[in-house]
Image (cartoon, rainbow, N blue to C red):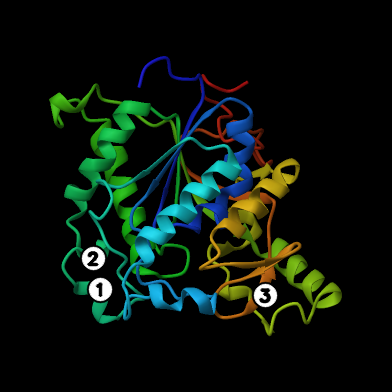
């Protein structure tokens, strides 16, 4: 890729829809501002539960065609966010959704959970050395909520960042590149509490039930959150992207539910923990730009 934009953001996610739920407003904001936003999705989410009854035949235990369908949903979501660079790790079909932790799908041939981390990271190194991002966003070591593919995405992204910076690694795969800042997806507990309070007060019956706070991936004590990105100006784009993932998400105004029919708030300010690199904020305050403190900051 030549003539790269000044600011370049890489996000690594496990399945289609994870990016829109966690980072949709952030992605739309930076894409609209001219940054190169690159999304790498590690699997096609073939084992996902399906919400619309008319599409139930796509399921893994029936036609097993959910993966290609979700690829189309992902493309539609990226169009809503204005993101033009979205890729599947190692190409379509390289790694398959591993199912929930402890499921027999964890150890099927091709399951992402069973993949060799260095091998999978090698595919991501190629992307890193091509687009040369200053910022990487992925999950924490627990994957936000313990899903094996989310944990593996964290491991692969972390390892790829290390390998991409090593000039001795695969010298034919492009010049070494060091990512300046790495973030984990986070949600401050106080924000989730307020969101659920709003759901109970204004739309308690919009979905059959209401999720618990600890059902939300990445919820942490407020003090761990280093960075918040105000994406309220892109709330419609985020909602449209989430709606594009119709097999997995039902959305109603500022609230949504997954296949469990338990409502939770859509967050348009999105939160992160800086885990590698120097903060661009004054001590004791949060950053408001993922590129803060890098040469690409403006």
Q: Quadrant of the C terminus?
A: top right
Secondary structure at numbered mark 1: helix
Quadrant housing residue 96: bottom left
Q: Are marks 3 and 2 in contact (CB under 8 Å)?
A: no
| Image quarter (top left, top right, bottom left or bottom right) of the N terminus | top left
Q: Nearer the viewer, residue 244 or 214?
A: 244
Task: Report which residue position mark 3 lands on.
Answer: 263
Number of callouts: 3
Secondary structure of the residue carrying numbered label 3: strand
Secondary structure at badge 2 equals loop
- Residue 136 on image: x %, y %: 44, 39
9 w.r.t. 159: above or below: above
- The residue depicted at 79 percent of the width and 73 percent of the height is 197
Q: Nearer the viewer, residue 255 or 82?
A: 82
Give residue 106's mark: 1
The CA distance from mark 3 to mark 1 is 28 Å
- Which label is found at residue 111? 2
Q: As drawn, which residue projects farthest toward the top?
A: 3
Relative to 168, say whether 53 is above or below: below
> Does label 3 or label 1 sit earlier along the sequence?
1
Q: Are marks 1 and 2 in contact (CB under 8 Å)?
A: yes
Q: Who comes first in sequence, dot 3 or dot 2?
A: 2
- Can you give x and y, in whole percent of width and height, for residue 277 in the image? 46, 35
- How far from the left and from the top, in percent, is residue 135? 46, 34
Cα separation between marks 3 and 2: 30 Å
Q: Is residue 226 left or right of residue 235?
A: left
Q: Residue 222 occupies which quadrant of the picture? A: bottom right
Residue 189 left/right relative to 179: right
Distance between mark 1 and mark 2 Cα atoms: 6 Å
Task: State the residue lying farthest toward the right.
Answer: 202
Disc 3 crowd, CA 10 A, few/some/many (<14, 14-19, 20+): many
Identify the residue at horizontal 57%, vertical 67% (top origin): 249
């Amino acid at each position: 890729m030549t003539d790269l934009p000044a600011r370049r953001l890489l996000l690594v996610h496990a399945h289609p829809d994870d990016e829109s739920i966690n980072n949709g407003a952030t992605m739309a904001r930076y894409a609209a501002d001219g940054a190169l936003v690159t999304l790498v999705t590690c699997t096609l989410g073939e084992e996902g539960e399906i919400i619309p009854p008319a599409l139930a035949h796509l399921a893994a235990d029936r036609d097993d065609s959910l993966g290609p369908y979700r690829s189309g949903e992902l493309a539609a979501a990226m169009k809503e966010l204005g993101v033009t660079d979205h890729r599947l790790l190692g190409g379509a079909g390289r790694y398959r959704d591993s199912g929930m932790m402890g499921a027999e799908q964890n150890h099927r041939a091709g399951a992402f959970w069973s993949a060799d981390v260095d091998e999978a990271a090698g595919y991501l190194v190629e992307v890193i050395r091509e687009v040369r991002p200053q910022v990487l966003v992925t999950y924490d070591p627990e994957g936000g909520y313990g899903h094996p593919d989310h944990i593996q995405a964290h491991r692969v992204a972390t390892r790829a960042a290390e390998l991409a910076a090593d000039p001795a690694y695969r010298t034919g795969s492009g010049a070494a590149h060091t990512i300046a800042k790495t973030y984990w997806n986070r949600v401050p507990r106080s924000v989730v509490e307020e969101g659920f309070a709003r759901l109970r007060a204004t739309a308690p019956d919009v979905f059959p039930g209401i999720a618990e706070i600890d059902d939300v991936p990445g919820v942490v004590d407020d003090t761990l959150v280093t960075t918040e990105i105000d994406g309220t100006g892109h709330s419609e784009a985020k909602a449209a992207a989430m709606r594009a993932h119709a097999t997995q998400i039902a959305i109603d105004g500022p609230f949504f539910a997954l296949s469990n029919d338990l409502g939770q708030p859509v967050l348009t300010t999105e939160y992160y923990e800086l885990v590698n690199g120097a903060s661009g904020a004054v001590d004791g305050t949060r950053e408001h730009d993922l590129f803060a403190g890098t040469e690409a900051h403006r």
